[in-house]
Image: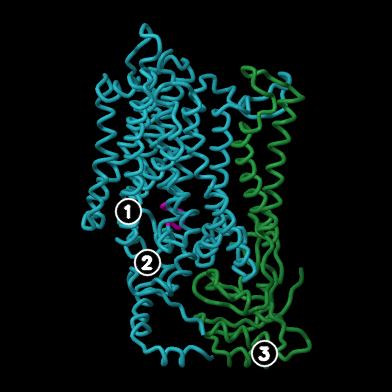
Chain colours: A cyan, B green
Amino acid sequence: MHLKYESIVREPLVDGNKTYRQVTEDIVSPIEKKPGKMWYAGFFIALALLGFGVFSVFWEVYFGIGVWGINRTVGWGWDITNFVWWVGIGHAGTLISAILLIFRQGWRTGVNRAAEAMTIFAVMCAGQFPIFHMGRVWDAMYVLPYPNTRGPLWPNFNSALLWDVFAISTYFTVSLLFWYSGLVPDFATIRDRAKTKFRKRAYGLASFGWTGTAKNWQRFESLSLVLAGLSTPLVLSVHTIVSFDFATSVIPGWHTTIFPPYFVAGAIFSGFAMVQTLLILVRKILGLEEYITLGHIEAMNKVIVLTGSIVGVAYLTELFMSWYSQVVYEQDAFNWRIIGPYWWSYWAMMTCNVVSPQLFWFKKLRRNIPFTFIMSIVVNIGMWFERFVIIVTSLYRDYLPGSWTYYSPTWPEVGFYIGTFGLFFTCFFLFAKYFPVIAVAEIKFVLKTSGDNFKKEMIKVDEQPLEEFVHENSHH
Amino acid sequence: MAIKKFAVACYDTEETLFPAVEKVRHSGYKLHDVYTPFPVHGLDVAMGLKETDLHVAGFIFGLTGTSTAVGFMSWIFTSDWPVNFGGKPHWSLPAFIPITFELTVLFAAVGMVLTYCYLNQIMPGVKKHIFHPRQTDDYFVVVIELNEHVSETEVVSFLKSTGSVETNVQIAEDSWWYGRWDEKEAYELA
């Protein structure tokens, strides 16, 4: 009576001969084992990077923002570049978990948990930069509208920078809630098969006492759908508001209406590249090749080539508009980007973001894992340069030629950036060890329609004559 | 909060679960609950559960967020501390849109998750009875509440006839309590 049918033309989402029990076993058993040498090596390298980052930030807080290379002309340097870069990376997680849920893209189930984790860790890293860029970081709470003894003096709600405070903090909170509400049933699965007392207690606490009653699952699905519906405009709003930080100013190179869609496309582009980098490693190390299949990698590469092309069109539109505007300041800003002292950053951006992703039009390359891995890193380098180009090459030559300058970072700035890699990978290593990196319940939900062994049954259904099929399935 | 007696039947596929749930409903026995390792579509209909109104709560929380943001910013910029930003109007509504949107989403999401936890009775530290350790793995567990009016053996043999892979009778707490998951409860040891 419950016929689960999906066309055999569609690639299976889960390879191998899987049962529900096997799915649990495959995904949960790495959590129950002791981590390997690779894990320890990676984790301690990440911790060391984090330690260096903490030291660099301490240096900056202790001696003041003057230890950075930024100056009166270039007020935003590596810090804001890194902020925008990390926030952008976060966007892929929400796209996968929310937008693809609404579009009923079944392949998201294999990758959404890890991608959402990546979102949360990336936003954590991003948030550090504007906070420490404030200089007097002990006054950071001044951006929040709380009753205070200074009037009360409120922040300026008309400022794009304050919109950012609200956008980023809302984005972090909602992503965390969405991620954790999905984790609760999976923690319950780990809890109920736990052999050690400590694991039973810890996952018992983390699973909030979930038992999986029919009513609870009904509410679970309602919650997921509404949170997805809320996150979809939210993720678009976040990078739109980040782009407003630039677009609402009157700086040539920033003052442009194309920024919101251009930033959102770029964010998804870099985010998917980061998902590829992480998942290609995770599937290999944890042996999850049957859940994160070549089909998943290809689907994400398609998103990369699409968003990469959108970004390319945006770059060309910017160039056209600067010429078409007939404003000399605009024209010079773009002219200097291409052939000025920062030409290398512009051409690094163009090569990595526009030219190289076009190779993904070839199916062979989309399904080639080493190539995808290299490309994912190339794209993230390119997207870092994009933010550097937008920020630094719009600022270093301002309206007053006397204050023109050339900006280079100092070691505490670079150290801060390296430190956020430490933070990101420390969190990700802990996640990969203690959390189910694939949503167990969601895989079980799609298993009978999209699992390899169950799809083979569909061949029989497809070949069956209509009369016979109706006869067999119309009554019970 | 009460300790009760339950008849428990485990099924390993949806194909046996659905007819079994239908039979239990028509048998007149008191269906306590059905536990599944993942959301099984159509099970709520088969059990006769009503559609959830959780999304309505989300909508109301969202509206609260919208009005909080608009009201708060309007009050501050028109009456509490009006600031002159380049001669622009104090009540600059279009500039309020981003924060209004963010607070709408924030209130809706946080409020809805809290409502969800309250309704589902889930919270860190909460403990509930697990009828079968595989109910969060691969078993679909149907639980019937027993009382003095029904015969225990009759219910068990009825459940066995529906194609269950495992059937038993358990004495259990029917609600939630605060407890540690690595410790056994008094009623389990008795």
In three-dimensional space, the C-alpha distance between marks 2 and 3, rounded to whole angstroms, equals: 40 Å
Alpha-carbon neighbours of circle 3 within 10 Å: few (<14), some, or many (≥20)? many
User: In percent of the image, x 36 and y 37: which residue is there?
Assistant: A314
Please, which chain is the residue tagged with disc 3 on?
A: B
The one of B95 and A131 positioned closer to us in this rendering? B95
Q: Could you tell me which secondary element the residue under label 3 belongs to?
A: helix
Q: Is residue A112 left or right of residue A455?
A: right
Tell me the number on the disc at residue A320.
none
In three-dimensional space, the C-alpha distance between marks 1 and 3, rounded to whole angstroms, equals: 55 Å
Which quadrant of the view contains residue A271? top left
Task: Compare marks 2 and 1 and give the one earlier in the sequence.
Answer: 2
Where is mark 2, residue-wise? Answer: A13
Residue B6 coordinates in the image, percent (x, y): 68, 80
Where is mark 1, residue-wise? Answer: A302
Q: Nearer the viewer, mark 2 or mark 3?
A: 2
Q: Is residue A440 left or right of residue A9?
A: right
Count of marks placed on residues: 3
Where is mark 3, residue-wise? Answer: B155
Residues at circles 1 and 3 in contact by the CB criterion of under 8 Å: no
